[in-house]
Amino acid sequence: MTDTTIRLSRKKPENFDGDMLIYTPFVNDKEKIISGQIVAEQEFNDAVSIGDFDGKYGDTLLLYPAGNVKKKIAVRRVFFAGLGNVEKKNDNETRELLRKTGGLIAKEAGATKSTQLGICLESILSCAGEAGVESLVEGILLGDYRFVKYKSKSKKKEKGSFTGIKEIVIFSSGSKSNRKILKGIKRAVNSATAACKARDMANEPGNGWTPTSFAVYARSLAGKYKMTCTVLGKGDMKRLKMGGLLGVNQGSSEPPKLVILEYKSPKKEADTILFVGKGLTFDSGGVSLKPSAGMQDMKYDMCGGAAALSAMSVVGAEQPDVNVIAIIPATDNMGGSSALKPGDIIKHYGGITSEIVNTDAEGRLILADSLAYGIKRYKPTCVVDLATLTGAVILGLGHHRTGLLGNSQELIDRIVRAGDKSGEPLWQLPLDEEYTEQIESDVADIKNSGGRPAGTITAAAYLQKFVGKIPWVHLDIAGTAWDFTKKSYIPKGPSGIAVRTLVELVRDWKKFS
Ligand code: BES
Ligand code: MN
Ligand code: ZN
């Protein structure tokens, strides 16, 4: 979706001379295909009559109507993507179906190297309203994602390469609600751009996206949207006694950063939400070294930080009625000669001591300092942290749902609703007292691993020690940040998970009780 421009047109689609014109027919209760007015009507009817298109969701049809001299159709390709029986779906199902249809459209654009698309809205508006346009556009932009930065020029130019959709013309012919449609498009562009930016950060290798990169990007957002950026360096961390973040960084020559970005709502007496995202730019495991097979994927261990910071770009652009602060503790986890060792004891910001039994359980160490510091310094109304924290969440939920735990059912419910609305489903895990026993230490206040049983829960129990009574939710995105459930608008590799959930959470935020 690099630099895709989108515009509304009141002109007739017949005259569109781009690469591909798109219709999204649906099916009504009587199994009848409803397509609205279409160019290439005869060709379409022929295809339907021989059974090549039934309008069901996922069914597609590509026509080349330029040979139809009578009608003088300018466009080279007409693409139909069926929606099925939308009327039987609830709102969230419809949103997801349209996003996925958007993903299919992006795939077809890629396959045919179509850079200029025209989209005819008639059928979408009649079955899903203006909100449907937002989901469709979001799906197209999310689906039209590629990361080619490190492909050398000659490779990029090889025959068959496609650099993405350049222009989308939306034919809203006759619709009286262009303002609403435009607003939806804007939201879709904001959220998809942010999710794609999070994917870009994650796709960067450990030597391409460093803690300093988080700081640089946060500063650029602060400049663009009048937000406040503060970057704490190693000296500040020493002064503040952030033994967790410093400890994890100890085996690395790459300096750590604690990146803070603050958005202040123009509304007086607004709530304040604090996001804390794990920005571990490469997790080797440290002295408790990870197995080498698949270790390269640990460049994705910064996806929580990427999501928190990317969501802030939408916050800046949309200015919601709630203050939002993002804190990203950023470092890599290496095993240099001064690295943390199993058995070492560290002291977190605020004074809690922790016995390091496994240097690979580093995420909770950097989050603990950040949660404690963020809560003390900014006194937020509530806190959401997100992290690729445990392999255990993959054993429990696979790659289809993000795990979530917390101390406030109200906040948990809000996030689950935001996730369902965004096509990023979550699943709550319990966080009972008993699990805390697993992280009791003989020599320090707590230890940093509770062993294999309930690994995701004991990790959350560790974090809970640093949040106290404040409403807090923890998202474990280890299973969903990459290799996320297969769908048309989710590419291979990093998914950008949680960006759109966070965005949805802050849009229309209602005062927290
Ligand atoms: N970043 C990993 C978690 C992870 C593992 C994410 C696999 C995605 C895929 C985290 O830092 C980690 O290593 N966790 C350990 C904790 C254990 C040592 C208590 C784990 O899950 O094995
Ligand atoms: Mn680790
Ligand atoms: Zn990690």
Image (cartoon, helix red, strand yellow):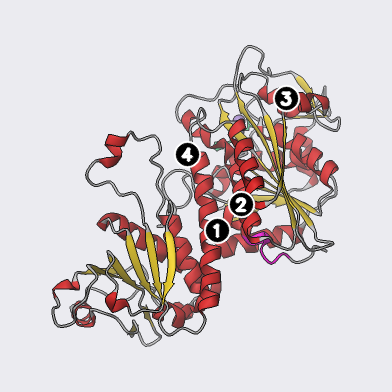
Above or below 201: residue 248? above
N-terminal of the pair, mark 4 or mark 2, is 4
Q: Estimate how packed mark 4 is, as few (under 14), some (14 to 19) or many (20 or more) residues with alpha carbons within 10 Å.
A: many
Residue 370 lies left or right of residue 280; in this view the side is right
Quadrant showing the C terminus: bottom right
Between marks 3 and 4, how big is the CA–CA gap? 26 Å
Between marks 4 and 2, how big is the CA–CA gap? 19 Å
Residue 332 position within the rendered picture, expressed as x and y whole percent measured from the top left: 60, 27
Give the labeled residue for mark 2. Answer: 313
Callout 1 touching callout 2 (CB < 8 Å): yes
Residue 349 position within the rendered picture, expressed as x and y whole percent measured from the top left: 82, 31
N-terminal of the pair, mark 2 or mark 3, is 3
Q: Mark 4 belongs to which amino acid? A: Asn
Give the labeled residue for mark 1. Answer: 190
Which residue corresponds to the image point at 53% horizontal and 51% vertical from the top-left? 195
Give the labeled residue for mark 4. Answer: 203
